[in-house]
């Protein structure tokens, strides 16, 4: 009897997932693309673009940790997430990069994100964790590859 209930519950959950509002996949995809492009700009700042890290066009020294490597992870992860390729692992990596940035750079300056200027790092970390959990949405290379299999 318990097995029957569990099977019916799993079937009902799968049906709800498949029949959710068709706009949801579009909104998730659009949000993923816009947020990854915006985040990619942060990665480019580490290389001196958009005013650089100092507002004067300066970049982080080549190969330095964590600055240069963080910029590489941000840029490559944002590009992967933007096109939706390996999006869940990329989003999880970016979530970790932002959590690391928050706890090593911002948290020592104060307890709360508003006090330590770490609000963007905290928000990006949670947004990327959300994308790692829910997936890339309808319009992503991962989704296209999955459909072809």
Image (cartoon, grey):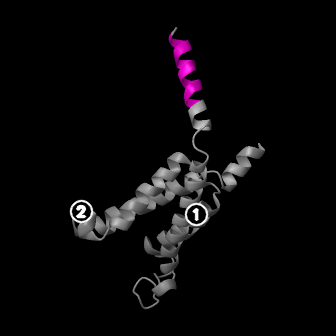
Mark 1 element type: helix
Residue 148 seen in the current view: yes
Decide: is 50 above or below 135: below
Q: Furthest-bottom residue in view?
A: 56
Please name whichever residue, 113 or 27, is drawn nearer the observer in this view of the structure: 27
Quarter of the image where one finds residue 55: bottom left
Residue at x 46%, y 52% (from the top left corner): 129
Q: Which residues are magenta?
A: 2-14
Q: Position of residue 117 (x, y in %)?
A: 30, 71
Residue at the spot x=30%, y=68% of the render? 106
Magenta stretch, main secondary structure class: helix
Q: Residues within 10 Å of mark 2 (few under 14, many from 20)?
A: few
Q: 50 left or right of 76?
A: left
Q: Quadrant of residue 26?
A: bottom right
Residue that numbered label 2 is attached to: 112
Residue named by callout 1? 33
| Residue 135, placed above or below residue 53 | above
Q: Is residue 48 visible?
A: no
Of residue 52 and residue 13, the one placed in the foreground of this image is 13
Q: Residue at x 47, y 69 (%)?
A: 70
Residue at screen point 56% across, 55% down? 27
Q: Considering the numbered disc 2 on the image, is that residue within a helix, a strand or a loop?
A: loop
Q: Residue 58 location, x and y as percent?
A: 45, 88
């Amino acid at each position: 009897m318990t097995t029957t209930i569990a099977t019916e519950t799993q079937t009902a959950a799968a049906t709800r997932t498949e029949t959710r509002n068709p706009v949801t996949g579009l909104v998730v995809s659009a949000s993923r693309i816009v947020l990854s492009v915006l985040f990619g700009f942060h990665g480019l700042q580490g290389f001196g673009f958009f005013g650089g890290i100092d507002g004067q066009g300066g970049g982080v020294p080549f190969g330095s940790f964590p600055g240069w490597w963080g910029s590489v992870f941000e840029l490559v992860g944002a590009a992967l997430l933007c096109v939706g390729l390996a999006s869940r692992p990329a989003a999880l990596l970016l979530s970790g990069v932002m959590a690391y940035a928050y706890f090593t750079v911002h948290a020592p300056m104060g307890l709360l994100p508003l006090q330590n200027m770490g609000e963007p790092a905290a928000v990006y970390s949670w947004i990327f964790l959300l994308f790692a959990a829910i997936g890339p949405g309808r319009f992503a290379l991962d989704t296209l590859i999955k459909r072809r299999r």
